Amino acid sequence: MGFSELLQEVGGFGRYQWLHVTLISIPGLLMASQNLLNNFVSGIPTHHCRLPANHSFYNLSHLQVDEKQLLRAFIPLDSSGSRLDRCRRFVEPQWQLLALNSSANISQIQTEECLDGWTFDRSEFLATTVSEWELVCSLRPLKQMIQTIYMGGVLAGAIIYGGLSDRFGRRSVLIWSYLQLGVLGCSSALSPSYSTYCVFRFLSGMAVSGVILNGVSLKVEWIPTRERTLVGTLTSFFFTFGQMILAGLAYWLRDWRKLQVVVCAPQFLFFAYSWWYSESARWLVLKRRSEDALKSLHRVARINGKPEIVEKLTLEVLHSHMKKEMDSSRLSHTAYDLLRTRGMRRISICLVAVWFSTSFAYYGLAMDLQKFGVSIYLMQIIFGFVDFPAKLLALGMLSYLGRRVSQAACLFLSALIIFANIFVPADMQTVRTTLACLGKGFTSASFTTVYLYTGELYPTVIRQTGMGFVSTMARIGSMAAPAVLILDEVFPALPSVVYGGAAVLAGCFACFLPETLNIPLPDTIEDVEDKWSGGSSSPQQHEGVALKEGCPGDMGSVVSTEGVALKELRDAEGTGLNAL
């Protein structure tokens, strides 16, 4: 008997589990806001060089021309010839350009950089970090650097808080993470400088990892096995709804400091009620704190309306249920085991490519909404909504086509759509937006697939370490994605070429992964070698679910090096669904 049977005895998925799952899932509505916040906090308003002080609009009010026409005498048109240049101005005013039907040759007219700064349009954004610190033209890479630094914090948090949760418990680290995100997130709104803001965003990213990692672990470890797939599916949509909530808040506020406060202040509420959570009984037992685990189980039994279980559930009963987990926790496995044998090397190398490229392409699309020529607020809502059919599509493909075909197909199709969008003219906004949504949908489906696939490929004894390793590659991909966006200064289509090329490469790697549909989960590294390095096994009814974490657009990491709760994942039938 295992811990899942023990949970059934104290009420199964009862009143406590409903409250527990709901309260932990609600913060997921704002985790998507954190990951995609830079789209709005660092949105780029329309801008042009500020006029010289001696040629302000006030001094030129006697001229019988409107402001837009007057700018033509000071600002050249860009290469498209349809809008004012954003980074150059004429050294001297060119009054002849104000004449109707002027055909003057401006290619030889001397221009200069924006020596007096920039003038920003306030119709789409009232204030952003870009307009406040003038992160445009030569300083434009600093805008993308904010997101890269934030994702670096998420990666650091996954490493640091993953270890701390194994040492101090999921509940303690989760409570601290709520407080850290609330304090540092709101402090970001008071940042007096760019460098200060970047420091706060890095530390906020660490806290986001702590919230997602420990929230998922604490949630899963109190849920009976057979309910995990359903709960994972339903709670994943909190992150999807969160993407649309972000668009609404950004449209309403349109000021980066106010938006920063509004998406972070609720963390204080989450901090206040998180003291109600019970620590994971699994973790407590494996840390030789059986008496505390017993108290938690008694509390859950009472809340679930099972007071009679309190007298029956003793330390001896608890230890008998947890014997397998306690014995397994004494086994020592390291990251070296991921590459120790031929089969493990093949799986690990292919999964690294798939995880990195999926995250790379996903955030490449999700973090550059302004390039589509449609309202950035509308694009965010559409991008959030497309995750619903994408996840349903992934579940259908996984059930009927298998894991390998589904994974490769999602990557190849996303690459095809990204490449196709390169050749669509900028004025065909509807077509470009539709293709972008399809591309984002297939990358989202790729994420859903790879979570399940990874959980089925790695053996039980090292599944936790493997998930942590490959999800780290996803973090690196999400860090690299914003940096690639600056390549559009060299050639506008270059970022799309890089994102699509990465997806194609990952799709090729996915073709070398073994199929796991209707094949039992491997328990040991030897099982992997027998099944996928020359051995064979008869297909049986598949047992297993994917490990789950929060994203994208999504995106957290799976924690707990001790594999708590993973042993019982084998008892769940069907598939798991990840939340981006």
Image (cartoon, helix red, strand yellow):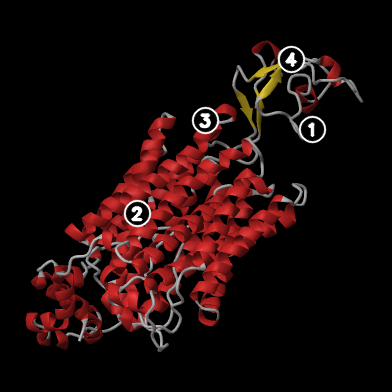
Snapshot quadrant of residue 67: top right
For badge 1, the amino acid type reads Gly
For badge 2, the amino acid type reads Ser
Q: Earlier in the sequence, mark 3 or mark 1?
A: 1
Badge 2 marks a residue whose secondary structure is helix
Nearer to me, 25 or 286: 286
Question: Which residue corresponds to mark 1?
Answer: 81
Q: Give the label on residue 110, or none.
A: 4
Residue 314 x/y as whole percent: 9, 82
Q: Earlier in the sequence, mark 4 or mark 3?
A: 4
Residue occupying the point 89% across, 20% down: 99
Badge 3 marks a residue whose secondary structure is helix
Real-space CA distance between mark 3 and mark 1, rounded to the nearest whole angstrom: 28 Å
Contact, mark 3 vs mark 1 (Cβ under 8 Å): no
Q: Give the label on residue 132, or none.
A: 3
Question: Which residue corresponds to mark 2?
Answer: 209
Q: Nearer the viewer, mark 4 or mark 2?
A: 4
Q: Residues within 10 Å of mark 1 (few under 14, many from 20)?
A: few
